[in-house]
Amino acid sequence: MVTLADGPTSQRVRVESFKAGADLSTKQFYFVKLSADRTVIVCAAATDKPIGILQNKPDAADKAAEVLMTGRSKLSADVALAAGDLVGTSGDGQGDVKVAGTDTTHYICGQVTLGVSNAAEIAEVEIDCVNIARAA
């Protein structure tokens, strides 16, 4: 766990090391989920429950996968994302807009702080995948 100093401009960050459940070398900044004890794979459905955002590029199963669970992260966008949008995983692990009351089977993981105009661009988000809830 990484924690930066307290103060008005500080940020608390939680990064945990898991094992990759597959080659994730092209999935940096995608949402991942648990697939077995301390093993992660890319989220594969909009209804998956993310544990966090992959920060590195493990190129084979059982290699270290660094996952940001809480804090500020880059996120590969599945659609255009605007500052203030609520986000969760898309069907391929990228960031997707979630609407409370509409996407009731999806999880809201955070909020966009730096938006992007197109899919596959890298947005910036504040996330908390430790305390996620459905978009009810």
Image (spheres, rainbow, N blue to C red):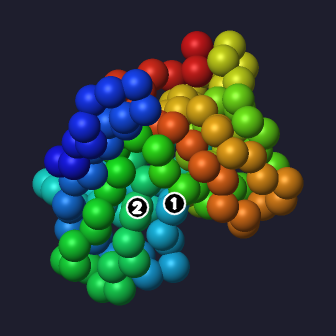
| Quadrant the C terminus occupies | top right
Amino acid on which the number 1 mark rests in the picture: Tyr
Mark with earlier residue (1, 2) = 1
Task: Determine whether 24 is above or below 92 in the image.
Answer: below
Q: Give 24 or 16, whichever is nearer the viewer.
A: 16
Contact, mark 1 vs mark 2 (Cβ under 8 Å): yes
Task: Determine whether 78 is above or below 14 in the image.
Answer: below
Report helix, strand or loop for mark 1.
loop
Report helix, strand or loop for mark 2.
strand
The residue lying at 72 percent from left, 66 percent from top is: 120
Q: Position of residue 70 (x, y in %)?
A: 36, 39
Residue 77 position by quadrant:
bottom right
Label drawn at residue 16 = none
Q: Residues within 10 Å of mark 2 (few under 14, many from 20)?
A: many
The residue lying at 70 percent from left, 29 percent from top is: 84
Q: Position of residue 5 (x, y in %)?
A: 25, 37
Question: Which residue is labeled 1 in the image?
Answer: 30
The residue lying at 78 percent from left, 53 percent from top is: 116
Question: Which residue is labeled 2 in the image?
Answer: 54
Residue 106 position by quadrant:
top right
Q: CA distance from mark 1 to mark 2?
A: 6 Å
- Taking 47 as reference, is 119 left or right? right
Q: Position of residue 15 (x, y in %)?
A: 27, 51
Q: Position of residue 6 (x, y in %)?
A: 27, 30
- Taking 15 as reference, is 126 left or right? right
Q: Report the number of discs.
A: 2
- Taking 78 as reference, is 3 left or right? left
Asked if residue 75 can be seen in this view, the reply is yes
| Residue that protrudes farthest toward the bottom in the picture | 59
Amino acid on which the number 2 mark rests in the picture: Leu
